[in-house]
Amino acid sequence: YRLNETSHPADWVNALLPLTPSDNLESIEDVDVKGDKRTKFSVSNWTSYTNMKATIAGERGHSVTGRWTNMTNDDVRRFLGVIILDGLNPSPEMTAKFRSQSQDLIQGNDFIHNNCGPDASRRYEMFRHYFGAQDPITSPPPRAECPNYKVHEFFNWLRYIWKKAWDLGPIVSADEQTCTMHGKSQYKTRCGKYKRIGDGIQTDAIADDGYTWDFYFRNEPVNSKWIKKGLSPMHARLLHMFENFRDSFHVVNMYNFFNSVNFTIEAANCKSKVLTQGVLQKSGRGVPRCVMQEEVTGKAVEKAGGTVKAATLLCNWSCSWNHCRLCF
């Protein structure tokens, strides 16, 4: 793609979201998002799927009756761009973004208004109703095998192109991410009233300096080889992503929810030889009793400060409820 720090932002966008198949310079052998050995990922596919869905669904009795006109590639890309901008700077309603700032000083956006045109609000409503990221004439697989079928092609592309766009540093992080949603879904996770992110569909992810390098949604099936070894589905998802690393001996920081001794051993023995570090809960995670440091209170805390109890696998020091763990 010949991209560097001086490249125009649009060139970077076109590499990550190619407008047409000719803009996608990846080999179909490397990334076959649809599984037919011939369809390259591009925004133009979404344009075709959207127009096809509108044709199949028909317009009779709907609010867009008599007003539907086929979307163009530029239409789809513009609306996707507006959705991204709204994610960065949310408005009470998306259509407010299409107004000029003379019409709506607070929520209006002159750049969007000038580029999307005066009829953008109506066109966006039709786009939102019929937009498709998956071929509507294909038969969906069983939900247990592919629960995210409607965006499966897109996820396959992101998992491939995001890895090509970033070289992982020696130390990365594993954590959970939430795609917020307001609708109903059996996969929706309640994140609790104390998390500002809100409820949504959760994924485990590998991140480096704020960049999401890989992700694995929690509603997706996991590789049975890790389950047969007695690991949890959460650890199976992480180990699957570890084996996608292009280099060995990365250090992955994690917090106590992800950690266990058995997981540490499997990570060190997997294909990419991953070293994990982070806090570890002292119960139910395989911590040997020989390395457990007794909790102390009162004046004994000062006496215990700075002392370390070590073992071959674990190092830990006094903490109110967790043990800090380093893998060697």
Image (cartoon, grey):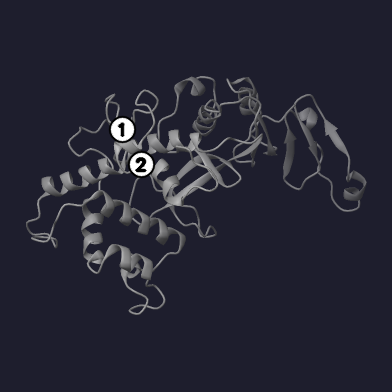
The quadrant in which the N terminus is found is top left
Q: Secondary structure at mark 1?
A: loop
Q: Residue at x 21, y 65 (%)?
A: 122
- The answer to whether the residues at label 2 and label 1 have Cβ atoms under 8 Å apart is yes
In the image: residue 321, left or right of residue 93: right
Residue closest to the eye, 70 or 12: 12
Q: Residue at x 62, y 38 (%)?
A: 172
Residue 118: x and y, percent?
24, 69
Marks 2 and 1, how far apart in space?
10 Å
In the image: residue 129, left or right of residue 168: left
Q: Exactly how many numbered labels are in the figure? A: 2
Residue 81, image quadrant: bottom left
Amino acid residing under circle 2: Pro
Which comes before the other along the chain, label 2 or label 1?
A: 2
In the image: residue 40, left or right of residue 314: left
Residue for badge 2: 18
Residue for badge 1: 40
* Mark linked to residue 150: none
Residue 80 in sight here: yes
Q: Residue at x 49, y 34 (%)?
A: 164
Assess disc 1: are there few (<14), some (14-19) or many (≥20) residues with their C-alpha within 10 Å of its C-alpha. Answer: many
Q: Secondary structure at mark 2?
A: loop
Q: Residue at x 14, y 61 (%)?
A: 64
Residue 166 versus residue 61 in the image, above or below: above
Residue closest to the eye, 219 or 304: 219
Amino acid residing under circle 1: Lys
Residue closest to the eye, 23 or 68: 23
The quadrant in which the C terminus is found is top right
Residue 148 in sight here: no
Residue 224: x and y, percent?
45, 22
